[in-house]
Amino acid sequence: MSWKDQANAHIGELKPYEPGRPIEEVEKELGIRGAVKLASNENPLGPSPLAVQAVQEAVASVHRYPDGGCSELRARLSSHMGLPGDQFIFGSGADEILELVAKTFLSPGDEAVMPWPSFAMYPIVVKGMGGVPVTVPLDASLGHDFEGLLSQINDRTKLVFLCNPNNPTGTSFGADEFSQFISAVPENVIVVIDEVYIEFARRSDFPDSLALIAERPATLAMRSFSKLYGLAGLRVGYGIGSPEMVDLLERARHPFNVNSLAEVGACAALADQDHVRRTLEMNAEGVDYLTRELTGMGYEVFPTDTNFILVRMGPGFDQRLLEKGLIVRPMAGFGLEGHVRISIGLPEENEKLVKALHEIRQADGERTGSS
Ligand SMILES: *Cc1c(COP(=O)(O)O)cnc(C)c1O
């Protein structure tokens, strides 16, 4: 027997997460410059300048271990959100919080129910513990199918993942359907509500997951500094749960899982709410602009509550945009054949995308002789 055969089967069979392609890699491969990445839902304005400055100042102290309790960030978020500090669990990105949940609650054979398509890490963290992801297709308008989710919950179900607003579709659900669903979920099933795009949501009836946590301790909400706050490269995310939930997850984490630069950067980013406002304003304008332009070209654009749009374009468009230096995210791997997910960029980046699409369409028209 080879040493490799000794790997746990559920790890050996895992298919790794496929991230958006880095700008440098694409530029090198195509021999181009000035590629635009609209593929990973990053903040196109970059991080807050105050966060950059704070991180630069903190670099000189990296010979010290981080504050394992993340106490500065905990205190600031606690006052920012009006919640006790013992209701936060911090991680190296929200990704780590997902992993902590899986590690804490799943044994081999346990089931986790989730909508699909949704965030690609859910099945990965579940399989990583030998658990079984049970995927429930989104409904016809790409919203959560709550009846379908309920129908898959059984005695083996330990976890339910919800993603609101949902990645990669941008769709969201409202308070009424959510509370109806929750009241039908058995009390012992842990409900994880991934809200890393919550700040971008514009619907007025967005569910109040924090109120639910107070009533239902087997609930965890998840947030991140990667998207709105523009700190994807630093890796800071957090969960919000009952103190009992947080206490359990705390046992599963590494002592210094959030590095000291990440904590300092997150504190400064949180304090810069002007940067947040600029980001939200620019994003809303970008969503409206791209939706208008792409719809005008005849593409189906799904309504979004996030910093990206899902567009049905037809097969091959991701590759053709890539050849023009525009990196978008192909969706075929999610079963959304011919769809792409496009992150909202700076105004000039969005315009570049629209221009590239016009060029592609013109070339097609010329080739078929139809215009
Ligand atoms: C980006 C993303 C995450 C992970 O965020 P990090 O904090 O960067 O790990 C989690 N869930 C969803 C839905 C995401 O889109």
Image: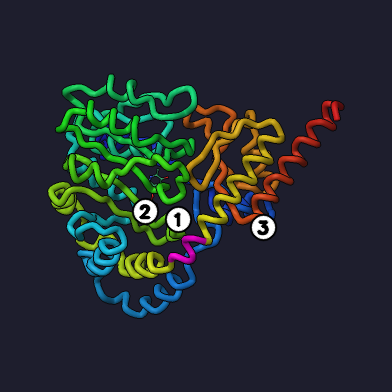
Q: CA distance from mark 1 to mark 3?
A: 24 Å
Residue occupied by mark 3: 34
Residue drawn at x 43%, y 70% is 51
Q: Residues within 10 Å of mark 2 (few under 14, many from 20)?
A: many
As helix, strand or loop, the secondary structure at mark 1 comes to loop
Q: Position of residue 246 (x, y in %)?
A: 18, 51
The disc placed on residue 224 is: 2
- 218 on left or right of 292: left
Position above or below: 98 against 31:
above
In this rendering, position of residue 47 left or right of residue 217: right
Residue 279 position in % (x across, y down): 52, 58
The way the protein has been coloured in the rendering is rainbow
- The amino acid pointed to by label 1 is Leu
Quadrant of the frame with the C terminus: top right
Location of residue 176 by image quarter: top left
Amino acid type at image mark 2: Ser
Specify which label sits upstream in the sequence, 1 or 3.
Answer: 3
Location of residue 96 in the rendering, given as x and y in whole percent from the top left corner: 30, 50
Q: For residue 291, what is the image quadrant? A: top right
Q: Nearer the viewer, mark 3 or mark 2?
A: 2
Does ligand 1 reach within 8 Å of label 2's beta carbon?
yes
Comparing 285 with 218, the one in front is: 285
- Mark 2 vs 1: CB contact within 8 A: no
Q: Which residue is mark 1?
A: 228
